[in-house]
Image (tube, rainbow, N blue to C red):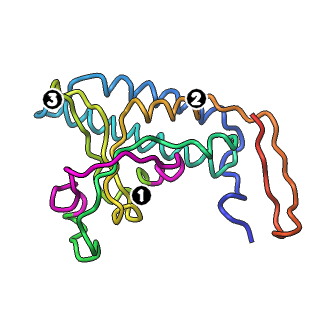
Amino acid sequence: METAEDCALVYESSYWKNELLVLAGEIARLQSWPIPEEGDCGEDLEFRLERALLYSAFVIRILFESNKLTDKMSGMSVPLVLFPSLVDDWDKVSPVSKRFPDSKYFDWDNSSKTTMNVRSFSNQLIHGATIITFEFDERDVPLGFLVTSDRGLNRGLFRCLFSDWLQVVRMIAADEVISYQVVFDRDKGKWTSCYVP
C-alpha cells in the first residue's frame, strides 16, 4: 500500500523553493514594520503576514511529502517557547472559544523552551486549532507568532520568532538534493529512500 511518503506531489522542486524565498522576503518585510492597531492597513498587513506563514508551511510540507529535501532537512528543528495547556479536556471547550489564545486556556507564566521538527511545526500552522496570533514589541513591530494544532492543544501553545522561522524557510529553499537512492528493505518488505546533499 502506498503512503504519503511514497507519493510525489511535485516533480520539479526549484519553483517551489524559489517561491519559499519570495515568501521569506515577504515575511521579513512585513514583520519589520509597525502594524497599526486600527484601520484597514493593520488588518491587511496582518493578513499578508498570516498568508505568507501559512503558505510557507504548506510549501515546506509539499516538499517533504514529495521527497524533494535531503535527510538533513527532515532532522532540522525549530526553536520554540511552549505555553502549557491549562485545559484537561479540550472537547469541553467551545470550538469558537479555543480559536483565540487566552490565559484561561494557556499558562503564560510558566513557559519553557522547546524544539519541534520542522515538518511537525509546519503541520501546527496548517492545522491550526487557534488563530495565528502575533506577538509585538513596544513599537508594535511583530516579533513572533503563536500557534497550535488540534493535536498540539493538549501540550500547549507554541511561540516561534520570525527570525527562527525565516532561517528555516531559507535553509529549506537552499537545500539541494544531488543524489537519491532507493533500496528495497527485505526485512520491512518495502522500498526506502535516502537523499544525499
Estimate the spatial distance between the alpha carbons at disc 3 and disc 2, rounded to whole Å: 30 Å
- Of label 1 and label 3, which has the lower sequence position? 3
Q: Which mark is residue 97?
A: none
Q: Which mark is residue 127?
A: 1
Q: Is disc 1 in contact with disc 2, using a CB cutoff of under 8 Å?
A: no
Q: Report the side of 119 relative to 127 (left or right).
A: right
Estimate the spatial distance between the alpha carbons at disc 1 and disc 2, rounded to whole Å: 24 Å
Q: Identify the residue under disc 3.
A: 36
In what element is the residue under mark 2? Answer: helix
Tell me the quadrant of the picture where the C terminus can be found. Answer: top right
Q: Amino acid at mark 3?
A: Pro
Residue visible at 35% across and 22% down in the picture: 29
Q: Tell me where the magenta segment starts and ends, as one range.
A: 98-123
Q: Which mark is residue 18?
A: 2
- The quarter of the picture where residue 159 lies is top left
Q: Amino acid at mark 1?
A: His
Residue visible at 33% across and 48% down in the picture: 112
Q: Is residue 186 above or below residue 26?
A: below
Q: Is residue 38 above or below residue 77?
A: above
Q: Does the magenta portion include 76?
A: no
